[in-house]
Amino acid sequence: MTTGDFIILSKKIAVGILIFLIPLLIIAGGIWLASNYIIQH
């Protein structure tokens, strides 16, 4: 494995993590906002 291979691999992993985390953050944020809204009203 060269440095270039490692950089490409780490970028692919980072993109995969982002693609996995962004929907989770959106869902968690939506649930959090909904629960706050329900508690306040």
Image (tube, rainbow, N blue to C red):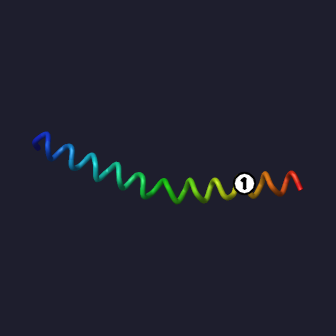
The amino acid on which the numbered mark 1 sits, given as a three-letter code, is: Leu
Left or right of 30: which side holds 9? left
Mark 1 packing: few (<14 Cα in 10 Å), some, or many (20+)?
few
Q: Residue 38: x and y, percent? A: 83, 57
Left or right of 29: which side holds 11? left
Q: Which residue is drawn at 48% across and 53% down?
A: 21
Residue at which label 1 appears: 33
Left or right of 34: which side holds 16? left
Q: Residue 6: x and y, percent? A: 19, 43
Count of numbered circles on the image? 1
Q: Residue 18: x and y, percent? A: 42, 52
Q: Which residue is drawn at 54% across and 56% down?
A: 24
Query: For the view shown, which residue lies furthest in the left direction?
Result: 2
Q: Quadrant of the C terminus?
A: bottom right
Q: Which of 37 and 3 is in front in this view?
A: 37
Q: In which quarter of the image is the N terminus?
A: top left
Q: Which residue is drawn at 85% across and 52% down?
A: 39
Q: Quadrant of residue 27?
A: bottom right
Query: For the view shown, which residue lies furthest in the right direction?
Result: 41
Left or right of 12: which side holds 36? right
Q: Residue 2: x and y, percent? A: 10, 42
Q: Which residue is drawn at 87% across and 51% down?
A: 40
- Give the secondary structure at mark 1: helix
